[in-house]
Image (cartoon, rainbow, N blue to C red):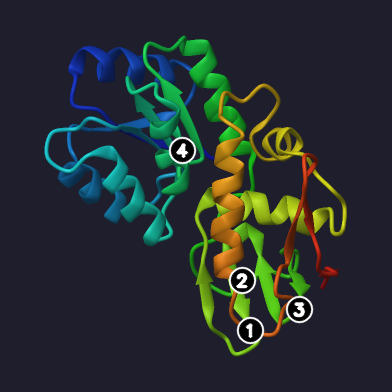
Amino acid sequence: MTQIHILLVEDDRDISEPLAGFLKDKGYVVHIAADSRAADAILNLGGIDLALLDVMLSGEDGFELCRRIRANGGPRVIMLTALSEPTDKVIGLELGADDYVTKPFDLRELLARIRAVLRRPQAQLTGKPSSTELVMQFSDFTFYPYRRILKSSTGLRVPLTGAETDLLLVLCQNPRKVLSREALISLTRGKNFPIAERSVDLLISRLRRKLAGGKQLDNPICTVRTDGYAFQLDVTVV
């Protein structure tokens, strides 16, 4: 069985060492970095499946590191932080984090979050689509959710964060169906995920902007007052 490699970016050894020990006991291979420079060196070697990022690092903070990981098509990301304000959680998820865990956290809860994130489709960062890859088409777009790729009919690639990919996939799986904000959170993040519904509105807004070019409808994601959102395009799985 292939082992899962986790990058833990944490500058407090009192946190990183026991956490790494716990994860190793659960069968994971853990690589520890105290700052973004050390993290980059490990990421450049490849093979990392999931990054656990502390937000308040010395030098470049975890938010900026998360942004760069997502921009480079890197592994899944879970933010670890003492910042508990909803706006901080929104920032982390908007930058592409797949989950956000507030310190102090229960190790069993963190393990459950890690397993949940790893169960989501892993991005294939390079190479051609496999014959079994899920491919969806709507309007003049082709969507490859497993690789987090959205392409227009002209070949233009539209960059998507992990959170945007998950949301677009759920919308494509439920075309023309009204989904509440609570349902969208549950379908993309799991039941009882501690995030404000406002974050869904922000993600919807970002997706609308990214779908703004081309020949699709003027408003591909319709707001249904008090009820939620509905994806207004017909979707074909190819």
Q: Which mark is residue 214?
A: 1
> Which amino acid, by three-letter code, is at mark 2?
Leu
Counting the numbered discs, the total is 4
Spatial CA distance of label 3 from label 2 is: 10 Å
Q: Earlier in the sequence, mark 3 or mark 2?
A: 3
Describe the element under mark 3 as helix, strand or loop. loop
Instruction: Kindly check if marks 2 and 1 are in contact, taking CB atoms under 8 A apart as contact.
Output: yes
- Residue 157: in sight, yes or no? yes
10 or 232: nearer the eye?
232
Spatial CA distance of label 2 from label 1 is: 8 Å
Spatial CA distance of label 3 from label 4 is: 29 Å
Spatial CA distance of label 1 from label 4 is: 28 Å
The residue labelled by disc 4 is 90
The residue labelled by disc 3 is 139
Indicate the position of residue 232 as horizontal and vertical percent values.
Answer: 81, 64
Q: Earlier in the sequence, mark 3 or mark 4?
A: 4
The residue labelled by disc 2 is 211
Q: Residue at x 24, y 43 (%)?
A: 39
Q: Residue at x 70, y 85 (%)?
A: 215
With respect to residue 68, does 196 lie above or below?
Answer: above
Q: Earlier in the sequence, mark 3 or mark 1?
A: 3
